[in-house]
Amino acid sequence: MHDIWNPWHGCVKCSEGCQNCYMYFLDKTRDNNGADIYRTGGFDYPLKKDRYGNYKVKSGELIRVCMTSDFFLEEADDWRDDAWSIIRQRSDVKFFLLTKRPQRVKDCLPKDWCEGWENVFLNVTCENQTRADERIPVLLELPFKHKGIMCAPFIGHVSIEKYLEDGQIEQVI
Ligand code: SF4
């Protein structure tokens, strides 16, 4: 089962794929501004338990993180250590991170990251060839156990064959 965890909400547009950001669109329909960035009330959602004391997010589930923001957003730097702590505590859950800011990732990893945690997947967005050529080489150098590429929104020709050759990319969406 797939679940969503939005520890913070709001974002800063940073590339062509942000032009029609659905989060900005949905916020506008509710008279909100997607540029307002805040820590959400669901920050500790992966640690929530039901009345029987069991985690609501079940062991083995895949949870998509920051679907209304970017996990590596600069404005979220003060909150990220707490989010890492939650991810560390739920090593039985798979956390799917997607970013348009892979150049920030290295400096945002926790001290005990080493070669990466088995339960964390990192995808970069490649909405066109320029962003593919910018972001995938950075991704390939990062210490993650699981790496992938998300071509969405698909707004231009994208060729990624050369980046698949060394076998690091597990998944292309
Ligand atoms: S990075 Fe994602 S959430 Fe942030 S503005 Fe761009 S499309 Fe929207």
Image: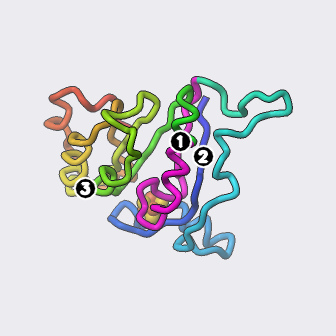
State the residue in front, 49 or 126. 49
Disc 3 designates what residue?
Answer: 131
Looking at the image, in which quadrant does ligand 1 appear?
A: bottom left
Disc 2 designates what residue?
Answer: 5
Q: Which amino acid type is marked by label 2?
A: Trp
> Do labels 2 and 3 touch, CB within 8 Å?
no
The residue that appears at 54% across and 65% down in the rendered structure is: 10
The residue that appears at 46% across and 30% down in the rendered structure is: 119
Question: Badge 3, how many Cα within 10 Å: few under 14, some, many 20+?
Answer: some
Q: Which residues are magenta?
A: 60-85
Q: Which amino acid type is marked by label 3?
A: Arg
The image position of residue 69, as x and y in percent, is: 50, 58
Badge nearest the viewer, 1 or 3: 1
Work out whether mark 2 precedes mark 1 in sequence or the reverse, and give the earlier one.
2
Give the Cα distance between marks 2 and 3: 26 Å
Work out whether mark 1 precedes mark 3 in sequence or the reverse, and give the earlier one.
1
Question: Badge 1, how many Cα within 10 Å: few under 14, some, many 20+?
Answer: some
The residue that appears at 57% across and 42% down in the rendered structure is: 86
Q: Residue reaching furthest right?
A: 51
Quarter of the image where the N terminus is located: top right
Disc 1 designates what residue?
Answer: 64
Residue 168 part of the magenta-drawn span? no
Which structural element holds mark 2?
strand
Q: Is mark 1 within 8 Å of ligand 1?
A: no
